[in-house]
Image: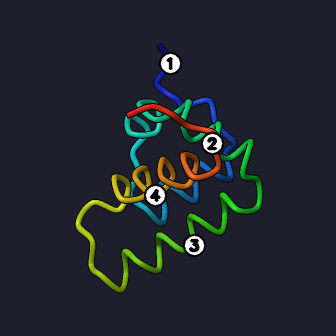
Amino acid sequence: MSNTPNININIRNLLIDHLGFTDAGLINNETLIKNGSDFMREDFIKLIITVKRSVDLKKIDSPSGYFIGALKNTLKSKGLYNGK
């Protein structure tokens, strides 16, 4: 296993800079993030922005976890995710 996640560098930087992800957190969620980015395209960036706004307004302690939950819910609603 590599120490660097295999995701788009711009997406990686947004998630690290704005939602507090670490490389380990990105690696643990790499498949989910790649699928979201690939299938949602522009909506994926919009989701990052929406979650960042919510995190700031609600003062959420775990922005990366909140984002992963929102991503899973969004993909489920589109029929693109059926995991836990």
Tell whether label 4 touches label 1 (CB within 8 Å). no
Q: Foreground residue, 53 or 69?
A: 69
- Decide: few, some or many residues near mark 2? Use Cα within 10 Å; few <14, some 14-19, many ≥20: few
Query: Residue under circle 3?
Result: 49
Which residue does the image show at 49% across and 62% down from the upper left?
17
- Decide: few, some or many residues near mark 1? Use Cα within 10 Å; few <14, some 14-19, many ≥20: few
Q: Mark 4 or 2, which is nearer the eye?
A: 2
Q: For numbered disc 1, what is the local secondary structure?
A: loop
Q: Mark 1 or 3, which is nearer the eye?
A: 3
Q: CA separation, marks 2 and 3?
A: 22 Å
Which amino acid lies under the numbered mark 2 shown in the image of this protein? Answer: Gly
- Compared across the picture, whether 17 is left or right of 40 comes to left
Q: For numbered disc 2, what is the local secondary structure?
A: loop
Q: CA separation, marks 1 and 3?
A: 28 Å
Q: Quadrant of residue 58?
A: bottom left
Residue 21, image x and y in percent? Answer: 41, 50
Query: Residue under circle 2?
Result: 79
Query: Residue under circle 1?
Result: 2
